[in-house]
Image (tube, helix red, strand yellow):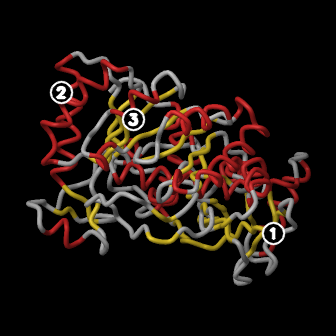
Amino acid sequence: MGDLAPGCRACVAGDWSCLFVNGRCNARCFYCPTSQEETGLPTTNAVSFRAPADYVAYLEQLGFRGLSLSGGEPLLTPGRSLAFLGAAKRHFGDRLHTWLYTNGIMVDENVLCRLRDVGLDEIRFDIGAVGYSLEKLRMAVGIIPTVTVEIPAVPEDFELTSQKMNEMAEIGVGYLNLHQLRLTPYNLERFLARPYTFLHGEKVTVLESELTALALIRHSFDAGLGLPVNYCSFVYKHRYQKAAARRRSAIFMRKPYETVTSAGYLRTLAVVAEDSRLADIQGRFKDRGIDPALWSLSPNGQRLLLAPELVVSIYCRGLKLFASYAECLIREHASCRHQFKEFRLPSGRKIVVERWLAQEFALYGDAREAFVSRYLHHGIYHQGDLLSDETDRPVGVETYECIVEGLQDYY
């Protein structure tokens, strides 16, 4: 409800990189999903960085416009956090929105001023780690341009959180972000000691946490607090962040006849027919002066790979249509089992973007007609658009074409 925090806008747009500065934390929150005992190296997307210059080059080459520093607790290694943040802001300036997640334990006025001086745009406090104290937020308001609270919605703390929301609005907190409790092997025992209902899904989440988040939004609205409240459910975060990571990597691997779907997969369309038919189609493309980059004959000569607009232009029932979807991921090293591209960092290190086949669909009859009509004639579809006619929907394709919308199903 209300505006999104600037960092959240970068996240939704898929323009954001989260650097886990360390893996160590000085708080003991019952809801923490992982162990936080090892300092480790700064890491993002399974790629570690020793040198800030390498990370800045990574941000530039992949086109990021948002950077968050997380952990662990990034202020347990203040020199490291300031070095990476400062290097990024010196290179990008206002082109890069930066924010830092903290439990606030290490925050004081000196720390806040040092963060401000190297260019931090936004700071996010998990006040659940410190008994919902707002002391450090009061200190941060007026020093860091944007002060945000980001906490899980804890059912037992509904009344306390409601009270604190009133205070947040009064002291100048810009935004409140709520997210959903998630069950993991690490926090299992602590969660089982509480009267929670666990939901099946992509991960195990807590029903009462979602209901609490929605009730807190209603409280803000009813009380007229003027405090923007955003509920980032687990399924929303999981789906959009994974799609954004796939999409950013897919851009590196895309050939002119391929399409990056809204779900972030790299889609390749191919028609199969007799050799003479494929040769005839290519001849017609050449006669019409169509850019040869928009089609390609497969190495075995059995498939003609086509851009979507060409599939539509030559489409007829005599052709078999195949749609394949690849997932592209950034890796420190190539597996050498899939196609990959490398890019070099200032230190001489190489990082690879690797593509591997996620799924292929052979489309015949009504399913083929529906696919062409839904995805090729009209571009990107939202999930709701695809549910209007269950009888001719290409089963399974929508998983790779669009991001599922809405809250998770309860079961």
Where residue 403 appears, as percent x and y from the top left, is: 45, 50
User: CA separation, marks 3 and 1?
Assistant: 41 Å
> Where in the figure is residue 239, as x and y percent of width and height?
44, 54
> What amino acid type is highlighted by mark number 3?
Lys
User: Which residue type does callout 2 highlight?
Assistant: His
Q: CA distance from mark 2 to mark 1?
A: 50 Å
Q: Which mark is residue 219?
A: 2
- Left or right: where 165 falls relative to 386: left
Foreground of the two, 323 or 407: 407
Q: Dot 2: within a 10 Å radius of its alpha carbon, few (fewer than 14), some, or many (20 or more) residues?
A: some
Q: Earlier in the sequence, mark 2 or mark 3?
A: 3
Q: Earlier in the sequence, mark 3 or mark 1?
A: 3
Residue 144, compared with residue 73, is above or below; it is: above
Residue occupied by mark 3: 136
Label 1 sits on what residue type?
Answer: Lys
Which sits in the foreground, 236 or 193?
A: 193
Answer with mark 2 or mark 1, whichever residue precedes in sequence: 2
Q: Is residue 114 left or right of residue 9?
A: right
Which residue has dot 1 on it?
350
